[in-house]
Amino acid sequence: MRYRTNQGLLIEAETSAGAIRRLRELSWNEQNLSDEAYMEAVADRMFQEGIHVSTLSPDMFIAGLLRGGLLTREPDDTQPDAANQEADRK
């Protein structure tokens, strides 16, 4: 999975938990927190801005960041896009 933060940083991870770990590692203020504490801290900040981000699971947390605009999904370089697949069929 590949995501881009709203600050332009590229995050690559195989799982949502891995993406959270990378986000935490890139955070200046929260590097020393556990992944769970990091999720809670981010969710609290988002809530103050009127955006609800669930911390029940890594998948739900990442989905909330996507909905809230903190992350966007990036194309995965390992999967050919539809145009390339169509060209290969011809």
Image: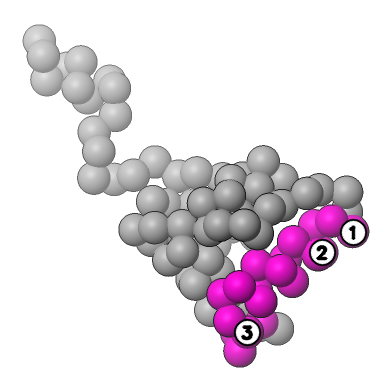
Q: Which residue is mark 3?
A: 33
Q: Position of residue 58 (x, y in %)?
A: 53, 58
Amino acid type at image mark 1: Gln
Q: Position of residue 53 (x, y in %)?
A: 71, 52
Q: Position of residue 1 (x, y in %)?
A: 38, 51
Going 71% across and 45% down the picture, which residue do you hit? 68
Amino acid type at image mark 2: Arg
Q: Position of residue 10 (x, y in %)?
A: 48, 59
Q: Which residue is mark 2?
A: 45
Q: What span is colored magenta in the figure?
A: 30-48
* 3D distance between C-alphas at marks 2 and 1: 5 Å
In the displayed structure image, the side of residue 21 where residue 64 appears, left or right: right
Q: Which residue is mark 1?
A: 48
In the displayed structure image, the side of residue 19 where residue 7 appears, left or right: right
Residue furthest to the top in view is 90
Q: Are there few (<14), some (14-19), or many (20+) residues within 10 Å of tag 1?
A: few
- Look at the numbered disc 2 and give the secondary structure of its residue: helix
Question: Does any portion of residue 70 appear in the rendered image?
Answer: no
